[in-house]
Image (tube, grey):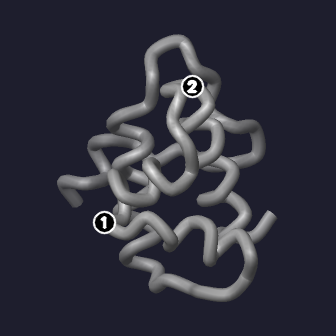
Amino acid sequence: MTLREQLILVSDEFGRARGIGRQRVSTIVLNRGSTLDLLAQSRSDLNTGTFERAMLWFSENWPEGAKWPAGVSRPLVSEAAE
């Protein structure tokens, strides 16, 4: 699974667990509502720093009771301090 696919999977699972759509998730996490849709359509890209910040944000804000997607490494909150 590519990093792009991992980010889309995590964002979609987060959205399902919170009852919000991909564009809203994109606005909350990436400050731009179209970013995740464009990534999913392979019409855009992002740098590794943005990917890492987004994944850490998801890990820190993951809904209680929701399962983190299988096959995707979950960053630990302590990694942010390094």
Residue lying farthest top? 65
- What's the residue type where badge 1 is placed? Asn
Disc 1 to disc 2: CB gap under 8 Å: no
User: Quick one: quadrant of the N terminus?
Assistant: bottom right
Q: Quadrant of residue 49?
A: bottom left
Which circle's residue, 1 or 2, is located before the other in the chain?
Answer: 2
Secondary structure of the residue carrying numbered label 1:
loop
Q: Nearer the viewer, residue 3 or 42?
A: 42
Label at residue 70: none
Secondary structure of the residue carrying numbered label 2:
helix
In this rendering, position of residue 50 left or right of residue 70: left
Give residue 54's position: percent from left, percent from top.
41, 59
Give residue 31's position: percent from left, percent from top.
31, 65
Q: Nearer the viewer, residue 6 or 13?
A: 13
Callout 1 crowding tier (Cα within 10 Å): few <14, some 14–19, many ≥20? few
Q: Is 57 drawn above or below residue 35 in the view shown? A: above
Q: Is 24 drawn above or below residue 30 in the view shown? A: above
Q: Quadrant of residue 15?
A: top right
Residue named by callout 2: 17
Q: Is 7 drawn above or below residue 38 in the view shown? A: above
Residue depicted at x 56% and y 51%: 22
